[in-house]
Image (cartoon, helix red, strand yellow):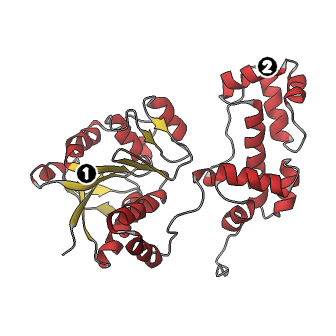
Amino acid sequence: MPETRDVVFVVFDGVKMLDVTGPAEVFAEARTLGAGYTLRYVSVSGGPVRTSIGALLPAGPVTDLCDAGDIDTLVVPGGDDLVGLPVPSGLVEAVRLLRPRARRLVSICTGSFVLAAAGALDGRRATTHWRHAPLLDRAYPDVRVERDALFVEDDGVLTSAGVSAGIDLALALVERDHGPDLAREVARGLVMFMQRPGGQSQFSAPLALRAPRVPALRAVVDLVSAQPALEHTATSLAAAAGVTPRHLARLFQAELGTSPARFVEDTRLDHAKRLLDAGHGVAEAARGAGFGSPETMRRRFVARLGVSPSRYRARFSATGPGDRSG
């Protein structure tokens, strides 16, 4: 008989359904191949919860686990109400109660906010959905947020990026528990990547910046955003702002937390992604975004996004039910 590993999901009203069912299906698929996973769902109320899609998810009480032995993997899924609002105290206490019983602690997507509120991420590296990573960074300064990672492990605490990244993390746990051969069979059965290429930056939306307060900086930001293909240098940007290059660098750091060169590169990457999304070729996108050559753009894509422009285009530009066999 395989070793039994008890996987417990802490669920709540508004929990993101795929944050639960995605990882659960990975463990369940592994079970059909001989892995000894058991799956349980508990809630603070001790009864069913209504998920993000309106379906009810049966769940037992958290307190029952206190007399039921150790937990192998404690999973805290995400939910929209965990961001921008105080994390429910009952949910935080449930994690604090169950955490000492678990061999490893896992969060999916915005479930990282629950772990952070419970103090489980203090002094640790962690990630979350790219859209909410800046808020996690600001709200919990003791957490070292890695914004591009699909998932992060730090001393038995594992956090994943948005939604489907929880499936990637669950597969990685299966590989760790039972080896790459079984994990590969799970991936094949679920028609998924064994290891998804690139980080979550490739999925992020274009830069969303508040308008700078300083008019000189606003003029530079507007210029680069409107015409990323121009040859923007520290000298030319400073001249457009009417300040010295050193002063412009201080303005960028103070208001935007970046450098002029990094802002130009980020803007060009965003513009190139939009051109590729719209179906433009790699060479055309490189020219339009100001990279100078397709090879320069390729190096930037690989360094920042973990994928080449052509692979990014293949992944995101096509829509519809056409043949994807190639």
Drawn side of residue 200 relative to residue 304, left or right: left
In terms of image quadrants, where is residue 259? top right
Quarter of the image holding residue 223? top right
Q: Position of residue 232 (x, y in %)?
A: 87, 36
- Where is residue 305? Give x, y as percent: 65, 52
Q: Is residue 23 above or below residue 98?
A: below
Q: Amino acid at mark 2?
A: Arg
Query: Observer-nearest residue: 166 or 110?
Result: 166
Element on which disc 1 rests = strand
Q: Secondary structure at mark 2?
A: helix
Q: Is residue 12 visible?
A: no
Left or right of 37 in this view: 113:
right
Task: Report which residue position mark 1 lands on.
Answer: 103
Residue for badge 2 = 246
Q: Residue at x 31, y 36 (%)?
A: 118
Q: Residue at x 52, y 64 (%)?
A: 195
